[in-house]
Amino acid sequence: GLPTRVRIHEVGPRDGLQNEKALVPAAIKAEFIHRLAEAGLTTIEATSFVHPKWVPQLADAEELMPLIDDVDARLPVLVPNERGLDRALALGAREIAVFASATESFAKANLNRTVDGALEMFEPVVTKAKDAGVAVRGYLSMCFGDPWEGPVPISQTVSVSRRLMDMGCDEISLGDTIGVATPGHVRELLDTLNEAGVADERLAVHFHDTYGQALANTLAALEHGVTTVDASAGGLGGCPYAKSATGNLATEDLVWMLDGLGIETGVDIGRLTATSVWMARHLGRPSPSRTVRALSQK
Ligand code: HMG
Ligand code: MG
């Protein structure tokens, strides 16, 4: 059966804006995050403490954090290494996320490490964060397919998930970075993870909508027992490695489906849509979300 409530992990300010060509000023990012919280989102991934040359769009993390310290929501931030953790802790971050890859090609492209090398880099980060009472999410990218390696074997994804969990991550977010997953594949991966001792309660799903499958995949995950879903307001962003650069599952598309199913999220879709329309105006291009387009044309 379906859950009665879903927690949406909003990634627009991070996964969305990291892929936008335009550099968005910190004050606009701060207003975006305030508006997302006012629309009812309770977890908003705010920024990344990565190398500023790797992701210049989020190089203003130090400037942004003090502008959002009054936001009434959980505000996780991405952290790849101890340097990043120190920066995040100095600014009062209470939740972090490390980000691993199921494939060697993406580990190299995204982290300049092997899969094992990246996990070694995360280990002291997770330990130090947990000692500081900071919650840790472990992202796993390329769980279904990889742009260089093609389809990713389920056993490979399960093995790295297990290692993230054993390292101490509180939650694992299964990333379909290039949006190639389909619902049968989602079910099979979740079944196999459960058999390997990774329960649905510890899992989140992170779908990109490149092939239009994100909502179908989400429904499959909810029917399976997952209750945490990542989404990006207005469907912001895109994958730099996929030709049709579409973003994450749009939060509005997700909320429209969940509202229709009678599943609680706490999100006010009208306020959220108004926020995405405002952001789209700032970015100078319309939101790719069907729901945002439909509701804003009314
Ligand atoms: P590297 O070049 O191997 O770095 O990059 P290094 O460890 O050799 O350090 C080189 C220099 O960078 C040193 O400075 C460090 O201090 C500095 P130097 O001594 O030469 O002057 N440095 C830093 N400076 C500031 N903050 C830091 C930091 N770390 C090192 N944190 C590194 C390795 C991990 C740093 C790099 O590869 C990196 O920053 N990668 C981040 C890539 C990224 O952010 N990708 C997007 C997020 S993942 C994603 O979007 C997927 C997801 O959405 C799920 C899905 O859809 O699949 C989560
Ligand atoms: Mg992503």
Image (tube, rainbow, N blue to C red):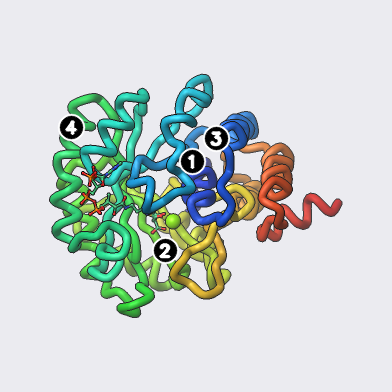
Camera sees residue 108: yes
Q: How many residues crowd mark 1 within 10 Å: few (<14), some (14–19), many (20+)?
A: some
User: Residue 133, how many percent across, how many down?
Assistant: 25, 25
* Marks 4 and 1, the one that precedes in the sequence: 1
Mark whose residue sits in front, 3 or 4: 3
Mark number displayed over residue 26: 3
* Marks 2 and 3, the one that precedes in the sequence: 3
Camera sees residue 40: no
Q: Residue furthest top?
A: 70
Mark number displayed over residue 145: none
* Marks 3 and 1, the one that precedes in the sequence: 1
Q: Identify the amino acid type marked 1.
A: Arg
What is the C-alpha distance between the residues marked 4 and 1?
A: 26 Å
Above or below: residue 234 compared with residue 94:
below
Name the secondary structure under disc 4.
helix
> Disc 2 designates what residue?
177
Q: Identify the amino acid type marked 4.
A: Lys
Q: Identify the amino acid type marked 2.
A: Thr
What is the C-alpha distance between the residues marked 3 and 4?
A: 28 Å
What is the C-alpha distance between the residues marked 2 and 3?
A: 26 Å
Mark number displayed over residue 128: 4
Name the image quarter holding residue 262: top right
Name the secondary structure under disc 3.
helix
> Disc 1 designates what residue?
7
What is the C-alpha distance between the residues marked 2 and 1?
A: 20 Å
Name the secondary structure under disc 1.
strand
User: Residue 106, how many percent across, how many down?
Assistant: 30, 66
Residue name at image x 69 percent, y 50 percent = 280
* Marks 3 and 4, the one that precedes in the sequence: 3
Q: Is mark 2 within 8 Å of ligand 1?
A: yes
